[in-house]
Image (cartoon, rainbow, N blue to C red):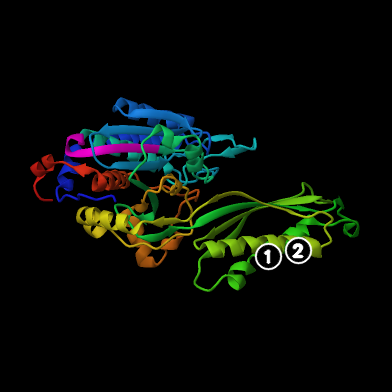
Amino acid sequence: MLTTKASPNLQGLLEKYRPDLHPFEETYRHMHRSPELSGQEEQTAATAASHLQSLGFGVHDHIGGYGVAGVLRNGPGPTVLLRADMDALPVEEKTGLPYASTKTTKDGDGRTVPVMHACGHDTHVVSLMASVVLLHAARAHWSGTLICIFQPAEEQLSGARAMIEDGLYARIPRPDVVLAQHVMRMKTGTVSVRAGRLLTAADAIDVRVYGRGGHGSAPQTCIDPIAIGAAIVTRLQSIVSREVAPGEVAVVSCGSIQAGHTANIVPDQLDLKLSVRTYDQATRERVLACIKRIVEAECEASGAVEKPSVKIIYSAPATINDEATVQALRGTFGSYFQENLVESEPATASEDFSLLATAVGAPYVMWTFGGVDAETWDEAVAKGTVNELPSNHSPFFAPCIQPTLRTAVDAMSLGALTFLGITESMNEYGQS
């Protein structure tokens, strides 16, 4: 069983060994200006790998794509894994920042799309890089093994599994605990860690409806897949309200509907892209079964001559934080962040981070930290407009650089030091 050796002297250690963050702020601006889509994180991964190598880590790269794993062995003790995700989103940035992304690239389907770090993964990468410098500099005060993972393709919920299936744990030690953090729509400088439910499981579903195309002036000769698709999208919204138990979390969203090219032609097929979010496994199974039943029934009701295709493209499990690990973190986070350790509610976003832990039976925790400018946040709270502030995946999402970056560096460093073996030399720092 993993034990913790929380010390009252960690504040002094962080103050002494935290690196000058100005160079990391510049690295952040560069990464924000130069985002890379899922599966294309070549330059970000190279930056992370080079950074780890410069600090004497044993580095493994190109794991499950552009995944990077660094290992620093520092005597006997626990093995702690820290993870940051690297990929950006196909979103056109509208923040107006001087370092805003104007980049476009081709996605996996060959389409030219805009690219933006609209989920804060650039913050995650840079804060882990800076935390590594702090922990490396302070290595006389802890004992154990530190693993740093820079993960690709989180936005597609495939990167963690790809790294595992590509032999991640044949190359690095198995961790005793796995930790990660995520910037969210919270006040900058604040941190939240909660036990149990944090993020939902996710399923992405591709649906193809087959109709019979023809002239738009003669719909009686056609089977219109657009009419079928419209009925499907409308009917899907009844799943949560009528087939999921009140109080249980479930979300069914249609993020894309594609059919036809011109006004006077009824197309012969239509494609839907659906997203499902749940916590409970039984609820998940019921929702997926409902989707399949509704799609097939609407097609049959409309006389479709071919059965529709309903395919789960990818899935990720719910993020359920380990109770004992959270309690240990609350001890160190509480004494350090004090009133800036805040409460938060579970979210209906999703992650694949937990697979890095469950693959080896290790406990895990993801915590969140804020990126909204303090004055902006306080004004929104006073006006009751917090939900109108840009959130993750918005084209206006732009965490303020400081104190967001410093908070993330301190939280990640504290998280690691909560579980690494603290040495007697910590006594030199006195009481925090």
Position in image of residue 255 (x %, y %): 61, 54
The amino acid sitting under disc 1 is: Thr
Q: Which residues are magenta?
A: 138-149
Dot 2: what SS? helix
- Which residue is at 65% across, 64% downward? 290
Report if residue 148 lies within the magenta region. yes
Q: Residue at x 87, y 58 (%)?
A: 219
Q: In front: 345, or 370?
A: 345
Q: Which mark is residue 298?
A: 2
In the image, is residue 36 above or below residue 155?
A: above
- What amino acid type should be assigned to the residue bearing mark 2? Glu
Left-right relation of 142 to 194: left
List the residue tagged with mark 1: 234
Q: Dot 2: few (<14), some (14–19), or many (≥20) neighbours within 10 Å?
A: many
- Mark 1 crowdedness (10 Å alpha carbons): few <14, some 14-19, many ≥20: few
Choose the circle earlier in sequence order: 1 or 2.
1
